[in-house]
């Protein structure tokens, strides 16, 4: 149910009911058409996604409906509506959410318009990233959100480090979660050779923290001429970090023996000397 015109008219209905309660009969007779949208379609959408309910013939706002009304910007109202829709009736394309923004470019025109007008394609906005991460966590694994939020903090810090070097990094992990690395940068402001960066973040102190590197992550890093791993410990206000080049990480990568292949390796942060983020 991704039609931005209907969603905007639902917003109008919720505002109307909040200011002036009305019966279902009075609404359907008085609003057979509203700004080019069928009043019946508006009412059915609001009921379908639990923004209103009919009680003793009267239209009543639900808690979800009240939360939408409380928002002062139509775009923020749209975000709440889209969140409710995705979680109430996950569409066939919901798997694209796990893959990142690039995959979402394949959505239909009507669906894309809803997300565009909600500001949910603005990937440089941390609030937008958090919105998508919450959806991903709800759809796939409820306890995933905290891990995602910790990881995003580290990625944002690494993006900041890169910008301080005078380059313009690309936040790859929000565009394509299957890329195998998190940030695409360049060697120097004047040298445009690609630098790929994998970011690992922990809430543990540096001496207790560790990170896992998968075989796939390592193979992808290994396939690029220039690659780094950034480590972040964010357990204290003074964040600590390390920037590891390919050779530093390679010392800790296991070998395959016989028919066996390693799949994951756990590496302690304390294997590397930390810096303080300022």
Image: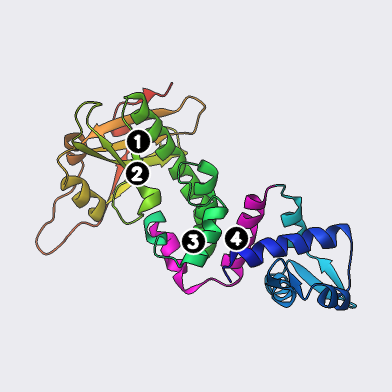
Is residue 77 covered in magenta? yes
Residue position for label 3: 112
Q: How many marks?
A: 4
N-term-proximal mark, 1 vs 2? 2
Q: Position of residue 231 (x, y in %)?
A: 35, 36
N-term-proximal mark, 4 vs 1? 4
Residue position for label 4: 83
Discs 1, 2 touching: Cβ within 8 Å: yes
Q: Nearer the viewer, mark 3 or mark 1?
A: 3
Q: Can residue 142 be seen in this view?
A: no
Identified at 17% across, 40% down, the residue is 250
Identified at 21% across, 50% down, the residue is 220
Q: Which residue is farthest left? A: 258
N-term-proximal mark, 4 vs 2? 4
N-term-proximal mark, 3 vs 1? 3
Q: Distance between the residues labelled 4 and 2?
A: 32 Å
Q: Where is residue 256 in the image (x, y as percent from the top left)?
A: 13, 55
User: On the picture, is 226 further left or further right than 161?
Assistant: left
Q: How far apart are marks 3 and 2 (CA)?
A: 36 Å
Q: Nearer the viewer, mark 3 or mark 2?
A: 3
Residue 65: image quadrant is bottom right
User: On the picture, is 1 further left or further right than 54?
Assistant: left
- Under circle 4, the secondary element is helix
Front one among 108 and 169: 108
Q: Magenta region's main secondary structure?
A: helix
- Mark 1, Cα crowd under 10 Å, few <14 / some 14-19 / many 20+, is many
- Under circle 2, the secondary element is strand
Discs 3, 4 touching: Cβ within 8 Å: no
């Amino acid at each position: 149910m991704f039609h931005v015109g209907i969603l905007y008219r639902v917003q109008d209905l919720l505002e109307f009911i909040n200011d002036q309660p009305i019966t279902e009969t009075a609404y359907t007779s008085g609003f057979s058409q509203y700004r080019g949208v069928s009043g019946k379609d508006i009412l059915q959408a609001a009921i379908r996604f639990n923004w209103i309910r009919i009680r003793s013939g009267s239209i009543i706002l639900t808690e979800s409906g009240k939360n939408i009304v409380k928002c002062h910007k139509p775009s923020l109202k749209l975000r709440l509506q889209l969140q409710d829709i995705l979680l109430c009736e996950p569409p066939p394309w919901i798997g694209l959410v796990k893959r990142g923004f690039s995959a979402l470019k394949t959505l239909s025109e009507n669906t894309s318009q809803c997300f565009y007008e909600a500001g949910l394609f603005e990937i440089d906005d941390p609030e937008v990233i958090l919105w998508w991460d919450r959806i991903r966590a709800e759809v796939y694994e409820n306890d995933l959100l905290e891990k995602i939020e910790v990881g995003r903090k580290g990625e944002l810090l690494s993006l900041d480090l890169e910008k301080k070097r005078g380059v313009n990094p690309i936040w790859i992990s929000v565009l394509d979660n299957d890329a195998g690395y998190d940030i695409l940068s360049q060697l120097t402001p004047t040298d445009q050779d690609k630098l790929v960066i994998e970011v690992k973040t922990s809430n543990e102190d540096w001496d207790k923290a560790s990170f896992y590197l998968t075989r796939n992550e390592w193979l992808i890093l290994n396939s690029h001429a220039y690659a780094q791993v950034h480590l972040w410990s964010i357990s204290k206000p003074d964040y600590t970090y390390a920037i590891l080049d390919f050779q530093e990480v390679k010392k800790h990568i296991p070998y395959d023996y016989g028919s066996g292949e390693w799949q994951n390796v756990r590496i302690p942060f304390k294997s590397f000397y930390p810096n303080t983020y300022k």
